[in-house]
């Protein structure tokens, strides 16, 4: 499966020492295809520089080791026809998932919870682990 992680999940994986999230990213990298968009990486850089400047080098080293497919997304995308999301900053994330044809978008953002898009499953990390993780990594 093609799986995209929202910025908030990437930050949690890279900053916080969560065994569950480490298992999730290992499972995704070993058994699926991790997809990240240019918008998500730009947002990650902004958040890290603002909130975790002392962790910047560590984050980039870890991120460099994670295999992923990069999708270039115009960060000026603001609206997707027929889809509503409360926070306009989330439109590029949703666009990234749709335009890169991912099967699953993993996010902790509650604004994505009520979005139904054919062919796209939106899950929290816990939901992903409950449905797709079998402890093989």
Image (cartoon, grey):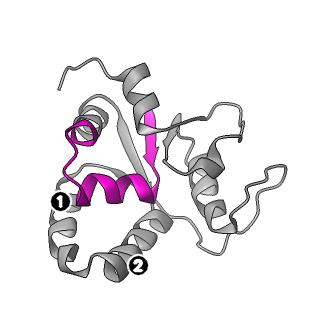
Q: Residues within 10 Å of mark 1 (few under 14, many from 20)?
A: few
Question: Would you place residue 135 above or below residue 94 in this image?
Answer: above
Depicted 123 relative to depicted 136: above or below: below
Q: Secondary structure at mark 2?
A: helix
Neighbours of disc 2 within 10 Å: few (<14), some (14-19), many (20+): few
Residue that appears at 73% across and 55% down: 85
Looking at the image, can residue 29 be seen? yes
Measured as percent of width and height from the top left, residue 11 is found at: 34, 60
Residue at image coords 29%, 28%: 31
Find the residue positioned furthest to the top: 134
**Residue 76 at what x, y percent from top left?**
65, 75
* Residue 1 appearing in the image: no
At 36% from the left and 43% from the top, the residue drawn is: 34
Q: How far across and how far down the image is residue 2, in percent?
A: 45, 36
In the rendered image, which residue does mark 1 sit on? 62
Q: Secondary structure at mark 1?
A: helix
Tally of marks? 2
Given residues 43 and 74, the one toward you in this image is 43
Q: Residue furthest right?
A: 82
Residue 103 is tagged as: none
The magenta segment: 1-22
Quadrant of the snapshot with the N terminus:
top left
Residue drawn at point x = 18 percent, y = 79 percent: 54
Q: Which is more toward the observer, 21 or 65? A: 21
Q: Position of residue 110 (x, y in %)?
A: 60, 48
Q: Are marks 1 and 2 in contact (CB under 8 Å)?
A: no
Tell me the residue that label 2 is attached to.
Answer: 46
Pick whichever of labels 1 and 2 is earlier in the sequence. Answer: 2
């Amino acid at each position: 499966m093609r799986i995209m992680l929202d910025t908030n999940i990437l930050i949690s994986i890279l900053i916080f020492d969560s065994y569950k999230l480490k298992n999730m990213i290992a499972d995704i990298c070993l058994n699926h295809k991790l997809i990240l968009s240019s918008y998500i990486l730009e947002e990650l850089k902004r958040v890290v520089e603002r909130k975790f400047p002392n962790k910047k080098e560590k984050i980039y080293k870890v991120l460099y080791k994670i295999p992923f497919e990069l999708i270039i997304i115009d960060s000026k995308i603001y609206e997707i026809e027929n889809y509503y999301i409360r926070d306009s900053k989330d439109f590029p994330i949703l666009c990234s998932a749709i335009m890169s044809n991912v099967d699953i978008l993993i996010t902790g953002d509650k604004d994505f919870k009520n979005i139904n898009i054919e062919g796209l499953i939106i899950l929290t990390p816990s939901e992903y682990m409950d449905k797709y993780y079998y402890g093989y990594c």
